Every structure is written in structure tokens, then in C-alpha cells.
Image (tube, helix red, strand yellow):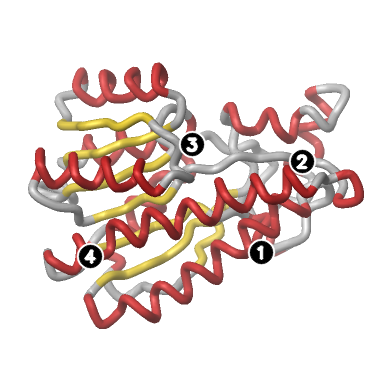
């Protein structure tokens, strides 16, 4: 198993890609420390990890609050001895034309999607340094690589994540800490409701989600998480500062 004796932090782990990530890391031998603002669903994730024979601790809270990442990191150190891997996954989606996007929604998107990743990185990087290195995988989006109608504000936050990823990779390379980003296309999770709400029918939404993809399918979390695990693993030891599209050929269109 690739992550035996490794300790992984996953943010946004209550459902969707975050839950799938926590379960996948645990299945490969890692101890997982998880957080989300959705406490009841986060507890369900923790129980699923334990039912599968994995080890976990969890801390419910707002990832935009520096104390949340701090408490989770403290739990990981106290229970498992340190932190080796971070999957910076927490995020929200608010869709709509830029002309109709409020400043409040724009600021909220940036705080949850991008500032939270900085706060978590700041708390976790020193712990990785103590263990001689580590790996950080930030969840960005195809919307950070290409313009998607109705996703301008969301896409701006994801583009910011890509620059954060590159800058962190440059700053942390000397410490043996690799930093990469995964850029999913449309994924069938609860968060997709933020895009579905822009359409009158499910068929219209699915046409929007897949029309510019070479592979005409709407992804499941299981289509994305194997790439996250690869980037976190020793097999990706020569990869840092990269943004890996997992989007059914959208950027090749």
C-alpha cells in the first residue's frame, strides 16, 4: 500500500471529492485527519473510514478560520505523530454571469476556495518540514485553466489557486515539500448544485457540463481521486508546481 505510515490531512471531507479522498488514502494505509464545516456529514465520513479499517481523527469547523486547520494539525500530531500529506480540497461554487455577481459572493468564493488553502498550508508546511518533506495537492478546476461561461468568479478563485500552487512549490522545494494542483472538470457532487441552478432542466445542465469535452461523460469523484493519490505518492516524486487537468479533454478541444 502506497501510504502505509503516512499521515494525511483532507479538507472539505464531509462529502463529494473530499470524502472519496479520505476513504482512498485510508484504503492505501494512511491515517487521515479530516475537517469540514458540515459536522454531521464529517462524522459520517469518519465512521466510514473506521468501518473500512482505517484510522482517523476529525475536527469540524470553518476552514476559513485559522484555528480550524490549527486544531486539526494538533490532533494529527497528537494521534499519529505528524503530517506528511495535505489534500487542500475544501471549496464552494457560486455560478452566474459576472455582471450579476455580488462583491460579497466574490469575496466569499475567494476566502473559501483560495485563502483557506493558504491558511492550511501555513499550518501544515512546518510539520512536513520536521519530517523531512511532504506533498500538498490543491484542488483547483478546469475553470482556472479555461473560461467557462457563468463560472467567471469561481474560475478566478481557481486560477488564483494555480498561482498559489506554483509559488508554494518554489518556496518549499528546498524543504522536500512538493506542491501540485489537480484541475477537475465537471464532477457529480453536491457542490455541482451551484451550477445546476443556472439551468431549467437536468438535460440542459449535462449538455453544458459535457459539450466541450472529448469524452462525453460527467465525472464521479472516483474519476478524480486516483490523480490526487498519484500526486501525493512517491511515484510523483519528480513533479512539483504542476496543474494536472482531469477533465475529459476539455482543454484539448
Q: Earlier in the sequence, mark 2 or mark 1?
A: 2
Seen in the picture, residue 181 relative to 241 is either above or below; the reply is above
Q: Give the residue at mark 1.
A: 145
Q: Nearer the viewer, mark 3 or mark 4?
A: 4
Q: Give the residue at mark 3.
A: 221
Q: SS for tag 4? A: helix
Q: SS for tag 2? A: loop
Task: Look at 33% across and 51% down and name the residue there.
Answer: 229
- For the residues bearing labels 2 and 4, Cβ distance under 8 angstroms: no
Q: Nearer the viewer, mark 2 or mark 1?
A: 2
Q: Give the residue at mark 4.
A: 126
Q: Earlier in the sequence, mark 2 or mark 4?
A: 2
The residue carrying pointer 1 sits among few (fewer than 14), some (14 to 19) or many (20 or more) residues within 10 Å by Cα, namely some
C-alpha distance separating marks 2 and 1:
17 Å
Q: Nearer the viewer, mark 2 or mark 3?
A: 2
Q: Give the residue at mark 2.
A: 95
Q: Residue furthest right?
A: 99
Q: Where residue 198 appears, x then y in whole percent?
A: 83, 32
Task: Look at 59% across and 38% down and name the residue there.
Answer: 187
Amino acid at each position: 500500500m502506497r501510504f502505509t505510515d503516512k499521515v494525511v490531512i483532507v479538507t472539505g471531507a464531509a462529502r463529494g471529492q473530499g470524502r472519496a479522498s479520505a476513504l482512498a488514502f485510508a484504503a492505501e494505509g494512511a491515517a487521515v485527519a479530516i475537517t469540514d464545516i458540515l459536522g454531521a456529514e464529517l462524522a459520517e465520513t469518519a465512521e466510514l473510514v473506521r468501518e473500512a479499517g482505517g484510522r482517523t481523527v476529525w475536527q469540524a469547523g470553518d476552514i476559513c478560520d485559522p484555528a480550524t486547520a490549527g486544531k486539526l494539525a494538533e490532533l494529527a500530531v497528537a494521534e499519529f505523530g505528524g503530517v506528511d500529506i495535505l489534500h487542500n480540497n475544501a471549496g464552494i461554487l457560486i455560478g452566474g454571469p459576472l455582471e450579476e455577481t455580488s462583491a460579497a459572493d466574490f469575496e466569499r468564493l475567494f476566502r473559501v476556495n483560495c485563502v483557506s488553502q493558504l491558511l492550511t498550508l501555513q499550518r501544515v508546511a512546518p510539520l512536513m518540514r520536521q519530517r523531512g518533506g511532504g506533498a500538498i495537492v490543491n484542488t483547483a478546476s478546469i475553470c482556472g485553466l479555461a473560461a467557462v461561461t457563468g463560472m467567471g468568479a469561481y474560475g478566478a478563485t481557481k486560477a488564483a489557486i494555480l498561482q498559489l500552487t506554483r509559488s508554494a512549490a518554489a518556496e518549499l522545494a528546498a524543504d522536500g515539500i512538493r506542491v501540485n494542483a489537480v484541475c477537475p472538470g465537471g464532477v457529480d457532487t453536491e457542490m455541482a448544485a451551484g451550477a445546476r441552478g443556472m439551468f431549467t432542466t437536468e438535460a440542459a445542465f449535462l449538455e453544458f457540463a459535457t459539450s466541450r469535452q472529448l469524452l462525453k461523460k460527467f465525472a464521479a469523484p472516483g474519476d478524480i481521486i486516483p490523480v490526487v493519490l498519484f500526486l501525493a505518492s512517491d511515484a510523483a516524486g519528480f513533479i512539483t508546481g504542476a496543474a494536472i487537468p482531469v477533465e475529459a479533454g476539455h482543454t484539448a478541444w
